Structures are given as C-alpha cells and as structure tokens.
Amino acid sequence: MALKRALRLRKSSDFQRVRQQGRVVSSPLLVLAYVPSNTQGIRVGFVVSKRISKLAVKRNRVKRLLSEAIRPFLPELLGNWDVVLSVKQQGVDVNPAMLTRDVGTLLQRARLRDAFSEQSN
C-alpha cells in the first residue's frame, strides 16, 4: 500500500532542494537526505535511478519496498522534515526486513526518530 499523498514528496523542485540544501547520512544499502520543511509533518520521497535497473518494473518495486520500510517509523518521526531515500546497488535484491532495519538505523543517525521509541523496539 502506498504512502498517503500528504506524506510524499512529489515535485522535482522539492527533491532538488533536499539534495542540494539537505544533510546526508548513508549506509551500505541506502542514502538518506533530509532538510527542514516549512510544511506540517514529515514528507518522504524515494529515488531509484536507472543505474539500478533499466526496467521501470524493478525500480517501482524497490520504491514500494522502501515505502513499506519507512512506514513503521512514521509515528516516531519528530518535527517537520522533507526526506529523500535513495537506494544503492547493494540494496536492490535485499530482504525487505534488512531494508526496514537499515531505514530505522539511518533515521536514528539523522536524529529524526524519537530516542525513547528506539529503546522500546
């Protein structure tokens, strides 16, 4: 199931702003870029380049997996942020549970997650 429209970044200008002005944390599987937003709450965008796969079907599948990977953390995210998740080549054929764990780790390193929720998980 896709994220609600209000939770997604949709404009290319928003993606560019996050990439150019934002901070970045990365792992072997993913890259997370984030910047403070002037909108209410968190908005998330996903990037899977053609270098990952020439097939749109495969790129869209990876985007859906990323969407499901970030979904459990949405209630824990603090503040107003625009976030862009990009997948690296190593992250394409990975178990979805590993993607979820990696997303949680990146959100924690970026200090976008509530520290108390990390202890309860």
Image (cartoon, helix red, strand yellow):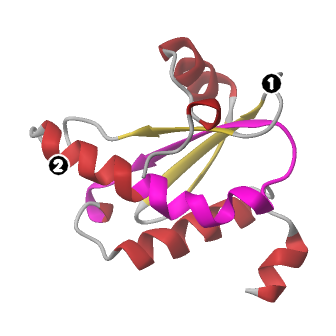
111 to 6, vertically: above or below:
below
| Magenta stretch in the rendered image | 66-90
Mark earlier in primary sequence (1, 2): 1
Amino acid type of the residue tagged 2 in the rendering: Lys
The residue singled out by tag 2 in the image is: 58
Query: In the image, residue 88 lies at what x, y percent?
Result: 34, 53
Question: What residue is at 51 percent from the left and 22 percent from the top?
Answer: 10
Amino acid type of the residue tagged 1 in the rendering: Thr
Image quadrant holding the C terminus, namely bottom right
Question: Callout 2 environment at 10 Å: few (<14), some (14 to 19), or many (20+)?
Answer: some
Query: In the image, residue 107 lies at what x, y percent?
Result: 68, 60
Query: In the image, residue 36 lies at what x, y percent?
Result: 80, 32
Give left or right: position of 12 versus 114: left
Residue 112, magenta (yes or no): no
Q: Is residue 52 visible?
A: no
Q: Nearer the viewer, residue 65 or 107?
A: 65
Q: Quadrant of residue 93?
A: bottom left
Q: Quadrant of residue 66?
A: bottom left
Question: What residue is at 52 percent from the left and 44 percent from the top?
Answer: 3
Query: In the image, residue 110 lies at what x, y percent?
Result: 74, 56
State the SS at label 1. loop
Q: Residue furthest top?
A: 13
**Can you tell which mark lies on residue 80?**
none
State the SS at label 2. helix
Q: Residue furthest left?
A: 55
Question: What residue is at 87 percent from the left and 72 percent from the top?
Answer: 115
96 to 31, vertically: above or below:
below
Question: What residue is at 64 percent from the left and 31 percent from the top?
Answer: 6
The residue singled out by tag 1 in the image is: 39
